[in-house]
Amino acid sequence: MALRRLLPVGVFAAQVLGAAHPIITPAPSLEDRDQALARREFDPGSYINSVISGLGSDVSSYVISGVPQFFQDFPVGNSVEKSLGIDDDDLKATPTQVLNIPGYANWTDSGWSVRIHGNVFKQPNITREKLDDLANVFLIGVDIDELPENQQNQARNLTSSIFVVQQDDVSVAINFQNDVYVRPNASGGVVNAKGGVQSFELPYNTTTEGDFDAWVTLQNTTGSDGGHLIAGNATSQIQALNVYTNGTNTGNATAYLVPPTGFTIISDIDDILRITKIYDPKEGLLNSFARPFVAWENMPEIYANWSASIDNFHFHYLTTTPEQATRNYMDFIYKTYPLGSFDTRPLNFSDVSATLSIRRALLDKIFQTFPNRKFVLMGDTTNSDVMKDYPQLAKDYPGQVQCIFLRNTTATDSTDLFPYDTSGFEDIDQKQYMFFVHADDLRGADIVGGNCHNTAVVQNVTFGYQGRGFGNEVDSAGNSAHWSWTALCAGLLVTLGQFLL
Ligand SMILES: *[C@@H]1O[C@H](CO)[C@@H](O)[C@H](O)[C@H]1NC(C)=O
Ligand SMILES: *[C@@H]1O[C@H](CO)[C@@H](O)[C@H](O)[C@H]1NC(C)=O
Ligand SMILES: *[C@@H]1O[C@H](CO)[C@@H](O)[C@H](O)[C@H]1NC(C)=O
Ligand SMILES: *[C@@H]1O[C@H](CO)[C@@H](O)[C@H](O)[C@H]1NC(C)=O
Ligand SMILES: *[C@@H]1O[C@H](CO)[C@@H](O)[C@H](O)[C@H]1NC(C)=O
Ligand SMILES: *[C@@H]1O[C@H](CO)[C@@H](O)[C@H](O)[C@H]1NC(C)=O
Ligand SMILES: *[C@@H]1O[C@H](CO)[C@@H](O)[C@H](O)[C@H]1NC(C)=O
Ligand SMILES: *[C@@H]1O[C@H](CO)[C@@H](O)[C@H](O)[C@H]1NC(C)=O
Ligand SMILES: *[C@@H]1O[C@H](CO)[C@@H](O)[C@H](O)[C@H]1NC(C)=O
Ligand SMILES: *[C@@H]1O[C@H](CO)[C@@H](O)[C@H](O)[C@H]1NC(C)=O
Ligand SMILES: *[C@@H]1O[C@H](CO)[C@@H](O)[C@H](O)[C@H]1NC(C)=O
Ligand SMILES: *[C@@H]1O[C@H](CO)[C@@H](O)[C@H](O)[C@H]1NC(C)=O
C-alpha cells in the first residue's frame, strides 16, 4: 500500500502522536528494504478513522506539539516507483543524483574531522500531467493551473524532488577541493582553505532511505601554492573546502572547518529567516510549494551585520524540513544570508513522532561536536520543539548557550493561533534570552557581551502553557482555528479519496 506515501501532511499527527518514543538510529543501518516497507504498511480505513477521532476528541493532543507539520510523510522507498508504475529496471539508465548537504568539521587529536551527510537518489521521468496531479495533493483550495506560471514551475520542481527513488546500499565517494568562492563581508569569517585536496570513499554505504551521514578525517595535504590546512588550535578562522561527489554534478557542497572556540549561531529558517506562515495551513503550503521564498523583515541585514561584526561567527542553519526540500532552502539561504553549514531532517526521521525529537538530536550532535564553542539559538514560538529544546540545552550544556532569540509570531500575525509553552524559560537568566516582535529588536542585543536582551523590548512572559484556543483553553478565536484545521483535514481526506480512485 503506497497511498500513505502519497499524502503530504500533518493529518497523520492525530494518528501517531502519543505513540511510544521513537528509536533514534545514530549509525547507518542497512535494514532490509522489504522489511522496512512492511513495517510501514498502511491501512487507509483505520487511518481515516484515526484522523477523524483524533480531531473529534483529542484536538489538543493533535496540536499540543505546536503546529501540525504538513511536511510529513513524503514518499520513500519503492512506494514512489509503485505510484508511478515503474520499477528499478526502468530507472537503470537514469543517472544517480546526490544531495550533499554542507557540513561542519571539528578539530580532533587526529586532525580535522568532517561530517558528510546527504542522500542518493534517482529522478524518474514523470509526465507533466502526472506531476500536476501530484503537486495538487500539496495545495489546499487551489489547483496548480490557477497559479501564476512561475509558481506552477516551482510547485512542479518541488514535487518532482519529492517523488524521487532513494538508492540504498550504494557507496559514496567524495573529493575535497580548496576552491570555495568566499563572498567578502558576507561569509561569517569564512576563508578558503589553502590545501586539503584529497578524496575518500565514505566508510558506510547508504541506508535503506538512501541517506549517508559519516565523519571522515582529513589528511594534511599540500596545496598547489604550497599552502596547508591550518590546525584548529592555531586559528580562529573558519576554513572552507568544497566537497564534490564522484560520478555526478549534482552532489556539490561546502564543508566548514570550525575551530574549537568561538561563537556559532544555530538558526531555524521557517518564519524567522523567511515568511512561511506555517500556522496558516493554506498560506504555509503555498509559501512552501509554489511561491518564491521571501525573507522575513530585514533579517538579512541583521545577519549580515552579525557576520561582519562578530569575529569568525559560524552560521549553522538547522531546519526540520525533510531532506527532499533542502535544495530550495539552501538556494534561498545562500542567496540571502551568510555562508554556513546546514542540517535538515534525514529520511529515517520521516514520521511525525520522530520529528518531535529530530531537532534535539541534531542540536545534541552539534553541541557535542563543539563542546567549547558558545551557541546563539534562533527560532520562533510556533515550534514546540524549539520552545522545549532551546531552554533545555541551556540547562544540559552549562556555559554553551550564549543567547536564545525567539520571534513571537503571534504578536505580528493574528492568524497564528497555535499554543506554545514558555515554562522552559522560567529559571533562565533574562540576560540569556529575548522574545522579540520585529527583526530590528535584535539590533540592540549584545551577543558577545552576553546581554542578549535588548532592554527596549518589553518582555511579558508568563511562564507556562500559552493556550491559544485549543484543548481546555477554548475561546472564540481558538474555535475558529480549530475549525480551520478541521476543514483542512477534511479537504485532505477528499484529496486522498481522489487518489484512491
Ligand atoms: C594542536 O592540536 C594538535 C592535535 O590535537 C596537538 O598535537 C598540538 O599539540 C596542539 N597544539 C597546541 C599549540 O595546542
Ligand atoms: C521523459 O518522457 C518523455 C515522454 O513521456 C520523453 O519525451 C522524454 O524524452 C523523457 N525524458 C527523459 C530525460 O528521459
Ligand atoms: C528545480 O530547480 C532547480 C533550480 O532551477 C534545479 O537546479 C533543479 O534541478 C530542479 N529540480 C528538479 C527536480 O526539477
Ligand atoms: C557498498 O556498495 C557497493 C556498490 O555501490 C558494493 O559493491 C559494496 O559491496 C557495498 N559494501 C558493503 C559493505 O555492503
Ligand atoms: C567589507 O567591510 C569593510 C569594513 O566594514 C568595508 O570597508 C569594505 O568596503 C567591505 N567590502 C565589501 C566588498 O563590501
Ligand atoms: C573520485 O574522483 C577523483 C577524480 O575526480 C579520483 O581521483 C578519486 O580516486 C575518486 N575517488 C574515489 C574514492 O573513487
Ligand atoms: C599541516 O602541515 C603544515 C606543515 O607541516 C603545518 O604547518 C600545519 O599546521 C599542518 N596542518 C594541520 C591541519 O595539521
Ligand atoms: C558541481 O561542480 C562541478 C565541478 O566544478 C561543476 O561542473 C558543476 O556544474 C557543479 N554542479 C552544479 C549543480 O553547480
Ligand atoms: C568532534 O566531534 C565528534 C562527533 O560529534 C565528537 O565525538 C568529538 O568528541 C569531537 N571532538 C572534540 C575534540 O571536540
Ligand atoms: C507574544 O505577543 C502576544 C501579543 O502581543 C503577547 O500577548 C504575548 O505575551 C507575547 N508572548 C511572549 C512570550 O512574549
Ligand atoms: C508584550 O505585550 C505588549 C502588549 O500586548 C506587546 O505590544 C508587545 O509586543 C509584547 N512583547 C513581546 C516581546 O511580545
Ligand atoms: C551590529 O551588530 C553589533 C554587534 O552585535 C551591534 O552592536 C550593533 O548594534 C549592530 N548594528 C546594527 C545596525 O544592527
Image: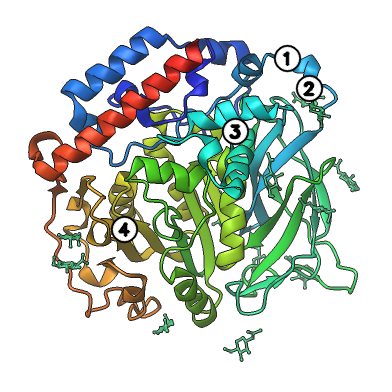
Q: CA distance from mark 2 to mark 1?
A: 7 Å
**How much space separates mark 4 and mark 1, taking CA atoms?**
49 Å
Nearer to the camera, 118 or 330:
330
Cβ–Cβ below 8 Å for labels 2 and 1?
Answer: yes
- CA–CA distance between discs 1 and 3? 17 Å
Residue at image x 9%, y 40%? Answer: 473
Say if residue 469 shows up in the picture: no
Task: Tell me where residue 377 sits by quadrant.
Answer: bottom left
Q: Position of residue 219 (x, y in %)?
A: 78, 56
Determine whether the residue tagged by mark 2 lies in a helix, strand or loop.
helix
Q: Is residue 208 left or right of residue 457?
A: right
- How far apart, in angstroms, are the residues tagged by discs 3 and 4? 36 Å
Q: CA distance from mark 2 to mark 3?
A: 16 Å
Looking at the picture, which amino acid does disc 3 mark? Ile
Q: Are marks 2 and 3 in contact (CB under 8 Å)?
A: no
Q: Position of residue 381 (x, y in %)?
A: 28, 53
What residue is disc 2 on? Answer: 91
Location of mark 3 (residue): 162
Per the image, the residue denoted by label 1 is: 87
Q: Residue at x 46, y 35 (%)?
A: 139
Badge 4 marks a residue whose secondary structure is: helix
Q: Taking 302 as reference, is 344 above or below it?
A: above
Secondary structure under tag 3 reads: helix
Name the quadrant containing residue 56.
top left
Color style of the picture = rainbow
Q: Nearer the viewer, mark 4 or mark 1?
A: 1
Query: Residue under circle 4?
Result: 394
Q: Residue shown at 61%/79% (left/top)?
A: 185
Which disc is residue 332 wearing? none
